[in-house]
Image (tube, coloured by chain):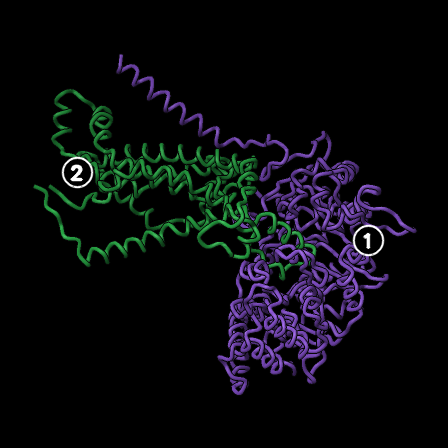
Amino acid sequence: MSIKRKFGAGDVVIYLVMLFVCFITLYPMYYVFILSISDPVAAAGMKVYFWPKGLYFRAYSVLATDGRMWRAYGYTIFYVISNTVLVILTSITCAYPLTSKKLVGRKFVVAFLLIPMYFGGGLIPSFLLISKLGLYNTVWALIIPSCFNIWYIILTRTFFAGIPESLRESARIDGANNFSILARIYVPLSKPILAVVGIYTIVNVWNSWFPSMVYQPDTAIQPLQMYLRRVLIEQTVDLTKLTQAEAEAMARLKLSNNQLKYSMIIFTTLPVIFTYPFFQKYFVKGVMLGSLKG
Amino acid sequence: MLKSLRRVLSVALAALMIVTLFGACAKDNAKAPGETGTAEPNGNKTGTKTIHIMGPESSNPYVKFAERDRYNSWKEFEKLFQEKGLTPEFEIVATDQYQTTLQTRMAAGVDLPDFLNVSQLDDSTILNYVDMGTILPVNKIIDEHSDGTAKEFFSTDGKGARSNVLNTAEDGNVYWISQIQATTYDDKPGSTNMGISVRKDWLDKLKLEVPKTTDDFYNMLKAFQDQDANGNGQPDEVLAFDPAGFTNGIAQWFGLVTDITSFVIEDGKVVSPWYQPGIKDYFKYLNKLASDGLMDTSLIGLTTADQLDQTIAQNKAGAIFTYCMQTWYEPSTGDPDAAYLPIGPLKGTDAAEPVNAIEPPFLSYNRWAFTKECKDLDAAGALLDILCSDKYMELTQWGIEGETYEVVNGEKKLLPIALNAGWEQAGKEGKAIGDSLWANGSMFPKRRFVPMENEISVVPDYKAEYQRQVIDYHPTTPLGNSNYFPVPTKEQVERRLELITDLTTQSKQLATQLILGQASLDDWDAHIESLKNLGLDEILEIDQSLLSRYKETIKD
């Protein structure tokens, strides 16, 4: 026998509120999309609201044939994959020993990890370090410094601590060493936390542009967000602050780039949008991490 | 077997990590042409002096320094380096990124080039680097390592004399060189100006006369709205400009100078618009425009140009503030008949004569300096001689005869491909003058001594006519003081920095409130007192001392 719940006024209100929230969440993205395929004059004149006006795909064709954009895309994928793999690797390998009560100096190590979470040297000391290590203006400037994330180590350690100690003990009795225990027991059980760490890293690296701006003057190895930033920055110059020759140069650049920025935004957000659904099921578990015991 | 496989894997992983560590330490300079941000040797030859030069990529959308090898003018420029036995290594940084790169590298003091564009450092920062010895004195390099070319250029009678005066610091040294643009008209110093431009096509459509007075201007704006000049059925035609500052065209109708402190060139006395006699009538006029809905008040206090561009793109801007010879706003209105006609200066008040806001006929701006990393001062001297040579000037402002300029009746005339409107064609055909390719605020300073007749000849007749008429208009006030203020002392820089931000904010805020009617002119004394308390008089004193110092040295 099925129990039918009455559809009351409260439900109507809830549905309306949720529809409104969906609308204000989705509309900006939709708006950018219809601007990107609308006629440039209509787009610049803000005459586009719910439907595109005058279909215009030239911006996409310009982007599709822009080698610089695809190169930036390629480098971004490289940075995302390498950072994600390294962050997961370092999180696992650093978190596992910290779960062992027999680790000598465990409290010291934890404190050593926690202090840099609150204090940093600042931009210039970081710059000096990157420069002296020979990473300046190389791809490694965006990989090596960011492959070690203390917050994710703590997150992973907390998750590992929730795995029963008895599993480790019984594995030891069966002759497994630490590598085997980590690889065959802890890692398979840690899919939720690894998915959370993975997706956070993917999104952070995908959206990252500041380290590239500081450490990579070479545009050939810069990620996609720097390219997008360049296109957007070129739209915001105040022409009255320039000499006449400079104002004319910037005005011509703004005109030619006006539609590009919308298409660029779509290009840069699509991969992340497509990636999220694959990690969706892990988020529910990840959100509740550490909140309930037993 | 599994155990040995794991062992092999661990060793391989460890080896890979070590190899990548060494890989990260190696710098790859072998980039394809057009790549930016790496040092690009320009044909290193044995026995030549190498100089590492860093600068932003040109902001020209079509002509890029990274693609310089495509241009004949560059090939001619390269010969100058070869004659001096100089091998330049270029590091081109994207324009939007240059400031960050410059600031971090200068602050860290590592990876410094020999010669670089330091325009994006403010006075205080650059004087600190001077004190720290990070930047070398250019005058000493010229005195000891120049073959005489640079010395003559910057001498009292040389073309760079005025620029040299402006760049001389408190200690008598010159720590940077600037780019120079001197405009003439009819062989005399001539300037373009910024002012109010109105929609000529709307005037024609509605059969209105060109405004000759401020009342005419008001009535014109009213007619644009009442008679729906843009034909969209809405009374949305407006004056689109930002009057929070005083560089807006209409302030000049009331005799007001262009900044919180500036001067009338013919007068030579630094004043503040807040003290000038036309100020109250100015605010009354703008308040009337705002109250009657003839001005787009959402543009007051703009921090970016997006909103202004949007108003123009919506075909609502019946009047704007811009360069009188501009031609770049018309296409963005979406109206094929759009035409902006410059007008004025109109007489706004009996209390003062209207002033014309001009781009000074002699511009010395932006900065290039040598850093402490420049150990070969002979190379530095050779570079300065190149940048001060007649051949460099010719390549920068004229390019190649037959390609970018022609000689007509003994006078040089730029071909259309070399003018601003021809950049796209120049980029496609590989024919560009140095001003577009290497001197557009990028790698090297420009040396531009070009008659205005060239630019006037390619704009529409009504703009050309206006430019010819207004060129002799007096009195004038400069757009920006930097071309008349030499390097301040450190104390002046620091004191000015302490005061100017709050003062500018208060000035803009007060102006906005007076225009919108949120503050009353009856409380004028209190308003002025608030500005005095923030140091307005002190800023006036500092600026006057700078102007006086300049005028003592340069006798016009």
Chain identity for the colour green used in the image: A
- Please tell me which residue lies in front, B344 or A282: B344
The quarter of the displayed image where residue B208 is located: bottom right
Direction left: furthest residue: A1
Residue furthest to the right: B409
**Does dot 2 land on a helix, a strand or a loop?**
loop
Residue B201's place in the image compared with B102, above or below, is: below
Residue drawn at point x = 57 percent, y = 73 percent? B294
On screen, residue A56 versus residue B155, left or right, reads: left
Residue B537 located left or right of residue B201? left
Task: Identify the image quadrant of the C terminus of chain B.
Answer: bottom right
Which residue is at a point 53% across and 45% down the rendered structure image? A55
Disc number at residue A162? 2
Residue A160, placed above or below residue B227: above
Disc marking residue B152: 1
The amino acid type, in three-letter code, at marker 1 is Glu
Q: Residue furthest top?
A: B1
Give the percent coordinates (x, y) of residue A118: 33, 50
Work out how far the residue at label 2 is from the one at label 1, CA to CA, in angstroms: 80 Å
Question: In front: B234, or A22?
Answer: B234
Mark 1 belongs to chain: B
Residue B176 at what x, y percent from top left? 68, 54
Q: Position of residue B260 (x, y in %)?
A: 60, 72
User: What colour is chain B?
Assistant: purple
Name the residue type under label 2.
Gly
Chain letter of mark 2 equals A
Q: Which mark is residue B200?
A: none
Circles 2 and 1: CB atoms closer than 8 Å: no
**Residue B485 seen anywhere in this rendered image of the structure:** no
Q: Is residue A246 visible?
A: yes
Quarter of the image with the N terminus of chain B in it: top left
